Amino acid sequence: MHPQIDTTAFVSITIGGKEYRHDVVIRLDGTIHKRKKKLSKIYTGSAHLISLAEIQRVIEQGATDLVIGTGQENQVRLSAEAMNFLNEQDVHVITADTPRAIHLWNGTCRPVVGLFHVTF
């Protein structure tokens, strides 16, 4: 079962009562990791455009869904290459500003991976 996300605000996201002050990736097994934004910065020039290389590191075999929290102001996007890869893997992508994305995350019971941007 994936962890419940409690809340988000500028510069933070609280998951299971613990506050994180950086972007996070939530794995299928519920573990929470700091997002490796450098992979997107190298390939796209921005952490706001998620690269294929980053998505290949984030997505896991068995995931049917990927929830992406695009920040408080909806700034993060998937590159075309990343979106094509996810389509080929038959992964349903849900993108929304982070406050709405956490609501969608908490409401799903499917095998899901999450990537959440906290706006700085």
Image (cartoon, grey):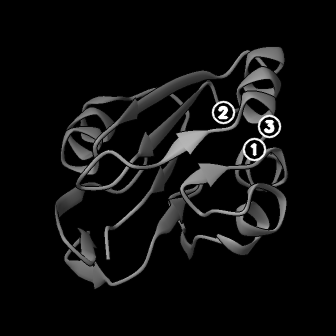
Marks 2 and 1 in Cβ contact (< 8 Å): yes
State the separation of the CA atoms marked 3 and 2.
6 Å
Identify the residue under disc 3: 61
* 46 sits left or right of 6 in the view: right
Q: Residue at x 54, y 61 (%)?
A: 25
Identify the residue under disc 2: 63
Q: Is residue 93 above or below residue 21?
A: above
24 or 120, nearer to the observer: 120
State the separation of the CA atoms marked 3 and 1.
4 Å
Few, some or many residues within 10 Å of mark 3 (<14, 14–19, 20+): few
Where residue 118 sits in the image (x, y, percent)? 34, 67
Q: Residue at x 26, y 81 (%)?
A: 18
Q: Is residue 64 above or below residue 71?
A: above
Where residue 14 sits in the image (x, y, percent)? 23, 72
**Mark 1, secondary structure of its residue:** loop
- The amino acid type of the residue labelled 3 equals Gln
Marks 3 and 2 in Cβ contact (< 8 Å): yes
- The amino acid type of the residue labelled 1 equals Glu
Quarter of the rendering containing residue 11: bottom left
Identify the residue under disc 1: 60
